[in-house]
Image: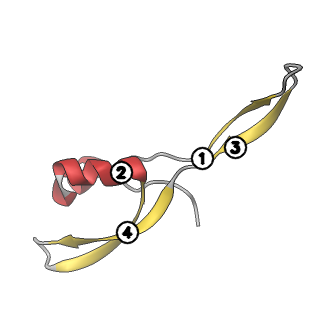
Amino acid sequence: MSKICQITGKRLIIGNRVSHSNKKTKRYFSVNISKKRFFLTSENRWITLKVSASGIKTINKVGIEKALKKKT
């Protein structure tokens, strides 16, 4: 199960953990992903999406119909 937001396309990124002595080691920045159900009024059915927190904010702002059209 990949951690990719289905609305915004955000995914896991790789960066550096920097110690006090400025020594760098690799680390991962994971995405705040959650499964959420949305109701499509045009199709009269529920859909389940894996969305990030910013994806949920986008859906709340523009609506699920426009957010899905914008992505695809």
- Mark closest to the chain's N terminus, 3 or 2: 3
Q: CA distance from mark 1 to mark 2?
A: 15 Å
Q: CA distance from mark 3 to mark 2?
A: 20 Å
- Mark closest to the chain's N terminus, 4 or 2: 4
Q: CA distance from mark 4 to mark 1?
A: 19 Å
Q: Between residue 19 and residue 28, name the one nearer to us.
A: 19
Kindly state the secondary structure of the residue where label 4 is placed: strand
Front of the two marks 1 and 2: 2
Which amino acid lies under the numbered mark 1 shown in the image of this protein? Leu
- Mark closest to the chain's N terminus, 3 or 1: 1
Q: Extreme left residue here?
A: 42
The residue indicated by pointer 3 is 28
Query: Which x, y percent locates residue 11?
Result: 54, 47
Q: Residues within 10 Å of mark 1 (few under 14, many from 20)?
A: few
Kindly state the secondary structure of the residue where label 1 is placed: loop
- Residue 36's tag is 4
- Residue 12's tag is 1
**Tag 1 and tag 2, C-beta contact below 8 Å:** no
Residue 48 left/right relative to 21: left
Q: Residues within 10 Å of mark 4 (few under 14, many from 20)?
A: few
Which amino acid lies under the numbered mark 2 shown in the image of this protein? Gly
Q: CA distance from mark 4 to mark 2?
A: 11 Å
